[in-house]
Image: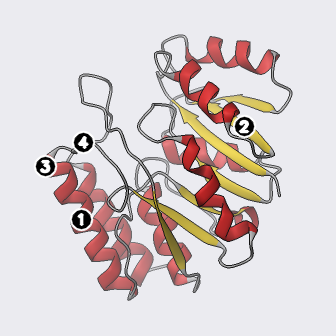
Amino acid sequence: MQLSVIMPCYNEAATLPAILEKVRAVKLDKQIVAVDDHSSDKTFEILEREAARDPAMVVVRHPANRGKGAAVRSGLARATGEIVIIQDADLEYDPEDYYELVRPIAEGRVNVVFGSRFLGRHTGMYFWNALGNKSLTFLTNFLFNCWLSDMETCYKVMRTEIMRDLDLKSNDFRLEPEIAAKVLKRGHRIYEVPVSYLGRTYEEGKKMKPSQGFYAIMALLQYRFLE
């Protein structure tokens, strides 16, 4: 089964070559779909250079900055694999975890896998970020009668037709609760796998802000009761 790796990119020139090297090192049949969300640094130049030597890599560039959710939708439209995974373009998540993330789907045991940072090895997050993650995961469990440890994880893996069926709408970081909510509302069970996490600091380019937690709460309520 082929894996399509969707990689949203926005001003990630500093880490992009390293993360692409790590993804390519994974010995799975895979396609890389990198989406430059109109970066202002050399991200797009790096992607073009990398794609020129990699026939399994597709590069898309947005004419304006639209957000992570929009980048994932653009990547999903070009995915050809039976399984899809979202990979951030920084170095917080380790592609070596792909093997364990993909295995339960490839073996036919489940159709959706989330990689949990709280079950795996990780650097300490910012206290308020960790508390926010735990609170949003608790709300997800409460609203959808499930038991997850990390709803906000980047590593959401599933059969490609399932992600396309979700009809994703979010343009920004509300993408994470939207995916979780719609997967659960459609009756899919989520299998969690421990993953390693090397969180970066705001000085290193971390983009998540505390205010985004409020929008995530609104998204969970919206997809539970209104859609």
Q: Amino acid at mark 4?
A: Lys
What's the residue at 34%, 75% (across, down)? 140
SS category of the residue bearing label 3 = helix
Q: Position of residue 10 (x, y in %)?
A: 49, 27
Crowdedness near tag 1: few (<14), some (14–19) or many (≥20) residues, C-alpha within 10 Å? some
CA separation, marks 4 and 1? 15 Å
Q: Nearer the viewer, residue 74 or 94?
A: 94
Mark 4 or mark 1, earlier in chain: 1
* Residue that numbered label 3 is attached to: 127
Q: Amino acid at mark 3?
A: Phe
- Is 128 placed above or below 104 here? above
Mark 4 or mark 2, earlier in chain: 2
Q: Position of residue 225 (x, y in %)?
A: 40, 84
CA separation, marks 4 and 3? 13 Å
CA separation, marks 4 and 2? 28 Å
Crowdedness near tag 3: few (<14), some (14–19) or many (≥20) residues, C-alpha within 10 Å? few
Q: Amino acid at mark 2?
A: Ile
Q: Position of residue 37 (x, y in %)?
A: 55, 30
* Residue that numbered label 1 is attached to: 134
Mark 3 or mark 1, earlier in chain: 3
* Residue that numbered label 2 is attached to: 32
Is any part of residue 110 visible from this angle?
yes
SS category of the residue bearing label 2 = strand
* Residue that numbered label 4 is attached to: 209
Q: Amino acid at mark 1?
A: Lys
What's the residue at 51%, 37% (across, down)? 66
Is any part of residue 38 visible from this angle?
no
Mark 4 or mark 3, earlier in chain: 3
CA separation, marks 2 and 1? 31 Å
SS category of the residue bearing label 4 = loop
Crowdedness near tag 2: few (<14), some (14–19) or many (≥20) residues, C-alpha within 10 Å? many
